């Protein structure tokens, strides 16, 4: 009897040509159905992306993906990664896409693990996360970055002015990119396997100059990874610092983006009372 190959069940259901993957590097292993387990596929991808020598956690332990069963009982997931460099991985979409973000934003993900682990050491594990861990989890699972050289777009997003941000201003025009979206949240990418209009990310709004947009997309991602790692180490984190953004409203991410599309108030909600999300300088 031929052994069942779970990786092929996942891989053929994900369309890596979708626009929300355009800023991510997709390793060749993600198109290979020969792996019996997702952790094996991800370990192969480490070598394909040439990051194995520098792919380490905050304690400088080399990162590798292992079976979920390698996580000892009574050991927290984050502490296990911090102490061993091993990431327990199940054969599902969620952990596959978590691995993809580790491969694309290794420094940022290592900082997430550092902050979780240090917070667990300081406060222990209880039924409710600390505010810091709440903010980290929200962004790690459902986050993204909108980086732009047009203040008009960032301010409009901040004000929930969807028409100005997403309809009146093109994010790319005549081959020139003014605004770029980078997916960070692996649960966000999991939701987008079956796209729905109401899928909403929580994004950081970042202003950048022309130099950032002159870089190749790989260099942009590498530079952003360093920026985000430092950002999360230095900022006081809270959930309201992130801007809600319906992902399929990003220009070209969905068909039929006419004005009526953006006037659906059940998805493109009005601004609520309170302090708006900040715009950070790259």
Image (cartoon, rainbow, N blue to C red):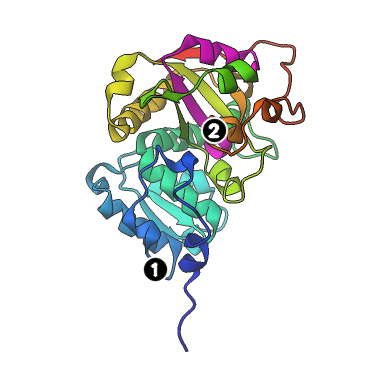
Q: Position of residue 144 (x, y in %)?
A: 51, 31
Q: Which residue is mark 2?
A: 143
Asked whether, in this view, residue 197 is left or right of residue 43, the answer is right
Residue closest to the eye, 244 or 135: 244
Residue 265, by quadrant, is top right
Q: Is residue 207 above or below residue 119?
A: above
Judging from the image, what secondary structure is the residue with disc 2 in? strand
- The front one of 123 and 156 is 156
**Spatial distance from mark 2 to mark 1, Cα to Cα?**
29 Å
219 over 208 or under it: above or below: below
Give residue 83's position: percent from left, percent from top.
Answer: 40, 46
Say which residue label 1 marks. 35
Give the residue displayed 67% in from the left and 39% down from the top.
197
In depth, the one of 70 and 249 nearer the eye is 249
Horizontally, residue 25 falls left or right of residue 192, namely left
Q: Residue at x 50, y 44 (%)?
A: 78
Question: In this picture, which residue range is highlighted in magenta?
Answer: 139-161
Name the quadrant containing residue 244: top right
Magenta stretch containing residue 142, yes or no?
yes
Q: In terms of sequence position, does the residue under pointer 2 or pointer 1 come before the other?
A: 1
Residue drawn where x is 22% and y is 46% of the image: 53
């Amino acid at each position: 009897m031929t052994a069942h190959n779970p990786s092929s069940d996942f891989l053929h259901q994900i369309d890596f040509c979708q626009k929300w993957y355009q800023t991510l590097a997709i390793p060749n292993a993600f198109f290979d159905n020969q792996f019996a387990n997702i952790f094996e596929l991800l370990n192969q991808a480490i070598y394909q992306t040439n990051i194995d020598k520098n792919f380490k956690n905050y304690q400088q332990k080399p990162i590798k993906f292992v079976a979920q069963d390698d996580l000892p009982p009574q050991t927290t997931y984050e502490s296990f990664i911090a102490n061993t460099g091993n990431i327990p991985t199940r054969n599902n979409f969620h952990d596959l896409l978590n691995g993809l973000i580790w491969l694309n934003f290794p420094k940022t993900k290592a900082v997430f693990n550092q902050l979780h682990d240090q917070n667990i050491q300081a406060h222990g594990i209880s039924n409710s996360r600390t505010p810091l861990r709440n903010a980290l989890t929200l962004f790690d699972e459902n986050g993204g970055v909108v980086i732009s050289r047009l203040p008009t777009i960032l301010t409009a997003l901040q004000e929930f002015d969807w028409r100005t941000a997403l309809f009146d201003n093109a994010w790319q025009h005549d081959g020139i990119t003014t605004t770029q979206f980078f997916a960070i949240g692996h649960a966000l990418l999991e939701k987008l396997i079956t796209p729905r209009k109401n899928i909403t990310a929580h994004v950081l709004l970042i202003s950048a100059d022309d130099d950032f947009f002159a870089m190749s997309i790989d260099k942009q991602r590498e530079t952003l990874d360093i920026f985000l790692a430092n950002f999360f180490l230095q900022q006081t984190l809270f959930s309201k610092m992130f801007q809600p953004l319906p992902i399929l409203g990003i220009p070209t991410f969905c068909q039929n983006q006419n004005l009526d599309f953006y006037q659906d108030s059940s998805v493109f909600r009005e601004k609520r009372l309170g302090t708006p999300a900040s715009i950070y300088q790259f």
